[in-house]
Image (spheres, grey):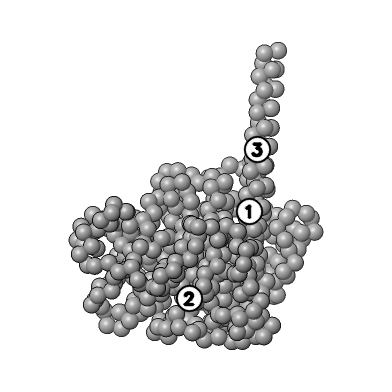
Amino acid sequence: MRSPDSSYDVQITHGRIPYSPCSVYSDTSTVGSSTPGRRRISVAARSVAGIFVRCFVPPETKISTFSVADSEEFKAPSVVSDGSRAGSERSRRGGSNRGVYATSNNSTHRREPGSVIFTMEEIFRATRNFSPSFKIGHGGFGTVYKGTLDNGTAVAVKRGKKSISQLDKHLGVEFQSEIRTLAQVEHLNLVKFYGCLEHEDERVVVVEYVSNGTLRDHLDCINGNILDLAARIDIATDVAHAITYLHMYTDHPIIHRDIKSSNILLTAHLRAKVADFGFARLAAETDSGATHVSTQVKGTAGYLDPEYLRTYQLTEKSDVYSFGVLLVEIVTGRRPIETNRELNERITAKWALNKFLEEDAISTLDPKLECTTANRSTFAKILELALQCLAPRRQNRPSMRRCAEILWGIRKDYRELTALDCHSLSSHSQRNASRREG
């Protein structure tokens, strides 16, 4: 089900997909251009490629992922302990090393979840009684409307579906998950939470309205404008910062569980904001030695971590895997699953990695992008980072913080290469002009 305006498409689906075992991924590869480094990446790519054979076959039917087993999403998680990890991650959140994650714009809310409560009268005024003309999306949770608060603030109002027997319980879980998560967090690259309402059979979440559609809209050129590679790198970096914040700089680490291009909203200036926290889950508390949370699988086909699918063990690295799929999507322009293509091209990540092994990765670059020296070099680096994120075993994937650091470096190098390309083009034009005058 697609929304009229996919900026607020809240459809969530997943399929139980058989897991295909593959060889162990080597974690020694790094993003770079050296020959030994690329050989290591090629070995890793062969290891990763097998995972796509059966893992991302799209389900024949779309299945709701609301689970009674997850009805206590934000209570103490069910975990497995491993003393080797005790306390190894929590120290990362303290002190003076937060950098961009500790600015005034990114500070954590100091209010209890759901403390900003709207009345039904305020919601009716904001949406003109849920006028059909204000509708901007719909999906599994319900319908989304554009609204205007009494103070003039533009908002997105998510109205949950009415009670439908057992489904109501599942939707209630998603509603509670979203408001609990949104009320805990505040970051430049996360949609802002304004409040909620829960009264009788009405469930409403009020969040920031982001006017420029989704990343998927822009990759599809729905508005007629092509995202250049510089904008795509900025968007990827914004998303990496947002997820890093969720994993490391909240009171308790949060796993988003549904990182995908249709959940990335873009501002008028093409800044990315991660949305839709209906599947968000508290991560395991590593201070106690826990390594993962055992939980039902939720997410979207094509982005789901295969290890999570196989074991039902959720960690922050599941978001890292989804981010790897997103990186491939960003540079190729293709959706993770494209059933209308030739069989060997239907699973985009598998296709791109196979082309990488054949030393023909450049053929997977989005044809809407120019094939300049800077674009070719940067594309290869992003694809190598994606490969690391797609490691079959979670231990071999980088952290989201490391992804953000690598993307910062890629962006810096890209800007320098672009400047060189411009300088070279200018010099060439001057030489041609001199010859004509001569």
**Which label number is shown at residue 408?**
1
Q: Secondary structure at mark 3?
A: helix
Of residues 7 and 248, the one nearer the viewer is 248
Identify residue type, mark 1. Answer: Trp
For the view shown, which residue lies furthest in the right direction? 36
CA distance separating discs 2 and 3: 43 Å
Specify the amino acid type for callout 3. Answer: Ala
How packed mark 1 is, by other alpha carbons closer than 10 Å (few <14, some 14-19, many 20 or more), is some
Which residue is identified by label 3? 419
Residue receiving disc 2: 281
Q: Secondary structure at mark 2?
A: strand
Instruction: Report the residue at 56% width, 64% height from top.
Output: 244
Task: Residue 396: name its quadrant.
Answer: bottom right
Amino acid at the residue labelled 2: Arg
Residue drawn where x is 67% and y is 13% of the image: 437
Query: Which of the two discs, 3 and 1, sits closer to the camera?
Result: 1
Q: Are marks 3 and 1 in contact (CB under 8 Å)?
A: no
Above or below 363: residue 283: below
Is 243 on the left or on the right of 59, as rendered?
right
Q: Quadrant of the C terminus?
A: top right
Judge left or right: residue 367 versus residue 392.
left
Query: Observer-nearest residue: 254 or 292?
Result: 254
